Amino acid sequence: MARDAPSLDSFGPGGFRVSGVWRPGSLLIVSDVVAPWPVRQLAEATPDSLYPVFAAGAREVEFLLLGTGAVNSLPPRPLRDLLQKGGIGLEYMDTAAASRMYNVLTAQGRRLACALIAM
C-alpha cells in the first residue's frame, strides 16, 4: 500500500531535496515528518540523537533506515542495542544507497524511520 510520505528527490553536497525543498544538513524522518538532525558523523548517532524514533516506538516504526555518510559503517553498539531492545529493526548503508532505498520502502508502505547523515 502506497503512503503519502515525503519524497526524497535528491541528495548532494551538504543536504537533501525533500518533496521539492532543499534541506541543508542531516535529516531525520519519523512518522512522515522531516526534521533537521544535528549529526555530522556516525559516532554522533546516539540514542539521544534518535529520541523521536524511540518515542514513536515499535508500533509506529518497524525499522530505522540509517544513512551512515559517505561510506557504510557499523553504527555504535549502544544504538544497535537500544534499537534491538525496543523491537525496532536497523538497516544501515551509506547515505547515497539509503537515500535511494527510502522512496522504494515508503512506496511499499513500510513503517520506517529514516536518519540520513549529509555528505
Image (spheres, helix red, strand yellow):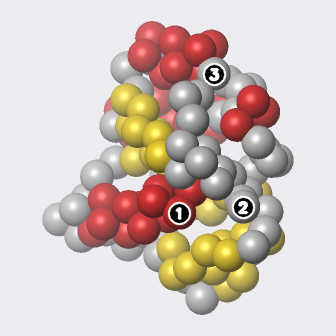
Q: Counting other residues with Cα less than 10 Å from the Cα at mark 3, is it few (<14), some (14-19), or many (20 or more)? A: some
Residue farthest to the front? 71
The amino acid type of the residue labelled 2 equals: Met
| SS class, disc 3 | loop
Q: Which image quadrant is residue 51 in? A: top right
The amino acid type of the residue labelled 1 equals: Ala
Screen quadrant of the C terminus: bottom right
Provide the residue designation for mark 2.
Answer: 119
The amino acid type of the residue labelled 3 equals: Pro
Q: Which image quadrant is residue 88 in? A: top left
Residue farthest to the left? 1
Q: Is residue 16 visible?
A: yes
* N-terminal label among 1 and 2: 1
Q: Are marks 1 and 3 in contact (CB under 8 Å)?
A: no
Give me the disc on residue 76. Answer: 3
Q: Is residue 55 left or right of residue 1?
A: right
- What is the distance, in whole Å, between disc 1 and disc 3 at their CAs? 20 Å
* N-terminal label among 1 and 3: 3
- What is the distance, in whole Å, between disc 3 and disc 2 at their CAs? 19 Å
